[in-house]
Image: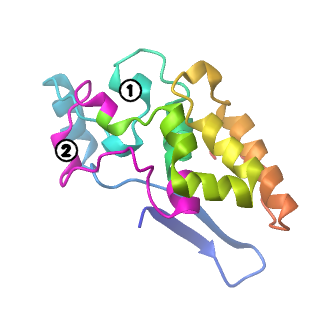
Amino acid sequence: ENILVFGECFSQEGCHAKLADFEHARPLEIFKAELSNGARSLGAPQYRAPEVWHQLEDVSKADVWSAGMMAFELFVGRLPEAVWEPEDSRDAPIGETFREFVPTAEEIKEDPGFVQLGQRDPQLAKLIQRMLSESSAHRPSPKAAYDWARSIARREGVSVPEQRGDA
């Protein structure tokens, strides 16, 4: 639903995929105007990192959190049970209802689907758990998370290209 595929998928060059989120997509001019008028909602709340909720200035590892939530959803089949999903995610402004969207480390570890994932693939579960550390200081950097995921994929015989500057 949020994956862009491009390239020659049936050639030797292959195709490439990029993750994207179009839920809040709008022209740049409108987005800038909304920000200058005090807009406070940014991105789907289920994937917002704790530092985004708290409006902290250092959000350098916020994408690692979001990717961790996507990985959880991809490998477990749903978001963590502790995450509330509103009917319209635009109804959840930044700073409000933080605990309804951000699961604690304990809630992640105890999630039945995550427990099953840990039994099937402990390394993958450990990576996702680290990516979902509430403290960004405990999360891997984007490059470290990529390298870790790449090593898991290679172990499974999946060919993953080297990370590029725009990855």
Q: Is residue 52 magenta?
A: no
Residue 150 placement (x, y as % from top left): 78, 52
Query: Please, is residue 45 above or below residue 74 in the view?
Result: above
Q: Is residue 88 magenta?
A: yes
Query: Quick one: SS at disc 1?
Result: helix
Q: At 17% across and 32% down in the image, what residue appears?
A: 34
Q: In the picture, which quadrant includes the N terminus? A: bottom left
Q: At 16% across and 42% down in the image, what residue appears?
A: 91
Label 1 packing within 10 angstroms: few (<14), some (14-19), many (20+): some
Residue 4 left/right relative to 46: right
Q: Earlier in the sequence, mark 1 or mark 2?
A: 1
The image's mark for residue 52 is: 1
- Give the camera-side residue of 47 and 121: 121
Residue 100 placement (x, y as % from top left): 30, 36
Query: Please, is residue 134 above or below residue 151 in the view?
Result: above
The image's mark for residue 82 is: none
Q: At 69% across and 52% down in the image, what residue appears?
A: 118
Rounded to the nearest whole Å, what is the CA distance between mark 1 and mark 2?
Answer: 15 Å
Residue 99 placement (x, y as % from top left): 33, 30
Which amino acid lies under the numbered mark 2 shown in the image of this protein? Answer: Arg
Q: How is the image coloured?
A: rainbow
The image quadrant of residue 78 is bottom left
Q: Magenta segment, which residues?
A: 71-99
The residue singled out by tag 2 in the image is 90
The image quadrant of residue 82 is top left
- Answer yes or no: is residue 163 visible: no
Residue 160 left/right relative to 131: right
Which amino acid lies under the numbered mark 1 shown in the image of this protein? Answer: Val
